[in-house]
């Protein structure tokens, strides 16, 4: 925050090329410092989205007997509109390859995605992106013994960015090293 204006969430980078037991504590402690600043910004933006606006806390010094405070939640309106516009149809995976086996595999993947509710997860992802500027999804493989109905081998979750961060390498490509 510079002079009271939000400047966005700061990406978390490290000079390390890989994370192991020798450097994880050092990298994590530096990352947590940046994460705590980002978390404050994200909470502030989320609270505005939920209707907790600064005007409600302002004290009126001139003619305090007339103190009408009206907060119109434009943040919620904008996020809702933009999210609905951006993701009005479910995202599907497609290909232009003529291989029939690959097409059948993509049909199966799209069926899996529909069954596990990826459309809802994408909606939550885009909503978080519009609220606070960052969003995270994770794909978790199921163990073969845990396969759910129809043998779906994975699940997708949208993570709350107030409790999630990613550490990237500062080398070209910014490879994700830790989350």
Image (cartoon, helix red, strand yellow):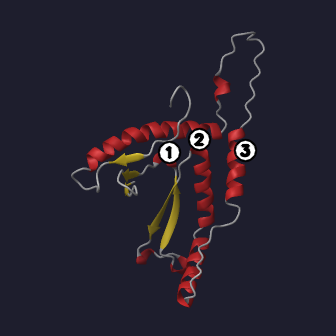
- Percent position of residue 49, x then y: 64, 41
Q: Tell me if 164 is positioned left or right of 89 in this view.
A: left
- Percent position of residue 7, x then y: 53, 36
The label nearer to you, 3 versus 1, is 3
| Residue annotated with mark 1 | 162
- Percent position of residue 8, x then y: 52, 40
- Percent position of residue 164, x then y: 45, 49
Q: CA distance from mark 2 to mark 1?
A: 9 Å
Q: Tell me if 76 is positioned left or right of 174 in this view.
A: right
Q: Secondary structure at mark 1?
A: helix
- Residue in the picture at 42% in, 78% down: 144
Q: Which mark is residue 111?
A: none
- Residue in the picture at 71% in, 61% down: 88
Q: Secondary structure at mark 2?
A: helix
Q: CA distance from mark 3 to mark 1?
A: 21 Å
Q: Secondary structure at mark 3?
A: helix
Vertical relation: 33 (above or below) 106: above
| Residue annotated with mark 3 | 77
Do residues under tags 2 and 1 come within 8 Å of each other at their CB atoms? yes
Which residue ends up furthest to the front in the rendered image? 172
- Residue in the picture at 55% in, 34% down: 6
Do residues under tags 2 and 3 come within 8 Å of each other at their CB atoms? no
Q: Front-most of 124 and 173?
A: 173
- Residue in the picture at 49% in, 42% down: 9
| Residue annotated with mark 2 | 46
Vertical relation: 173 (above or below) 165: below
Q: CA distance from mark 2 to mark 3?
A: 13 Å
């Amino acid at each position: 925050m510079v002079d009271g204006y939000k400047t966005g969430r700061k990406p978390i980078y490290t000079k390390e090329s890989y994370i192991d037991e020798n450097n994880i504590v050092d990298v994590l402690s530096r990352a947590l410092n940046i994460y705590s600043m980002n978390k404050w910004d994200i909470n502030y933006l989320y609270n505005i989205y939920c209707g907790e606006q600064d005007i409600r806390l302002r004290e009126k010094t001139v003619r305090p007997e007339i103190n009408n405070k009206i907060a119109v939640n434009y943040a919620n309106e904008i996020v809702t509109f933009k999210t609905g516009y951006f993701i009005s149809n479910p995202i599907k995976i497609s290909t232009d390859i003529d291989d029939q086996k690959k097409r059948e595999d993509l049909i199966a993947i799209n069926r899996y995605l529909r069954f596990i509710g990826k459309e809802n997860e994408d909606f939550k992802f885009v909503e978080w992106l519009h609220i606070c500027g960052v969003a995270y999804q994770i794909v978790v493989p199921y163990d073969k013994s845990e396969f759910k109905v129809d043998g779906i081998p994975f699940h997708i979750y949208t993570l709350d960015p107030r409790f999630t961060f990613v550490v990237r390498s500062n080398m070209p490509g910014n490879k994700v090293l830790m989350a």
